[in-house]
Image: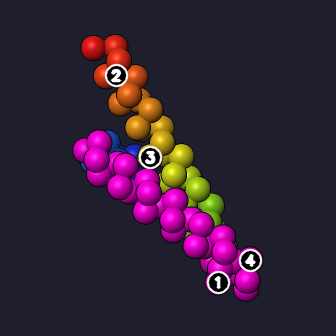
Amino acid sequence: MKYSDIKALTLEELRERLAVEKTNSQNLRFAHSISPLENPLKIKESRKNIAKLNTELRNRELQDTQK
């Protein structure tokens, strides 16, 4: 997921996408603990997407408080 795509989302869409990504990350970790994934880099990518979404949410919160 590109940062420009994240910036285009509304606040509610960001929160929904974050919840979906957290669930996806958890499922990937569970699946990987049971049997190795074909592509374990998906876990790393999911973690980075969660960080990007959290960063954008925090930036928007800070912008709202400054106004």
The span shown in magenta is: 10-39
Q: Which residue is mark 3?
A: 53
Alpha carbon of mark 1 to alpha carbon of mark 2: how far?
41 Å
* Residue at figure coordinates x 54%, y 46% from the top left: 51
Crowdedness of circle 1 by 10 Å Cα count: few (<14), some, many (20+)?
few
| Residues packed near mark 4 inside 10 Å, few (<14), some (14 to 19) or many (20 plus) | few
Q: Earlier in the sequence, mark 1 or mark 2?
A: 1
Dot 2 or dot 3: first in sequence order is: 3
Q: Is residue 30 magenta?
A: yes
Label 4 residue SS: helix
Q: Residue furthest top?
A: 66
Quadrant holding the N terminus: bottom left
On the image, numbered disc 1 is attached to which residue?
38
Identity of the amino acid at label 1? Glu
Q: Horizontal placement of 59 versus 45: left or right?
A: left
Q: Which residue is mark 2?
A: 63
Measured in 3D between alpha carbons, the distance from the residue under mark 3 to the one under mark 1, in whole angstroms, is 25 Å
Which is more foreground, mark 4 or mark 1?
Answer: 4
Q: Amino acid at mark 4?
A: Ser
Mark pair 2, 3: CA separation: 15 Å
Q: Tell me where residue 35 appears, x and y as whole percent.
A: 73, 85
| Label 3 element class | helix
Whole-number angstrom distance, CA of label 4 to CA of label 1: 12 Å
Instruction: Give coordinates of residue 47: x percent, y percent.
Output: 58, 56
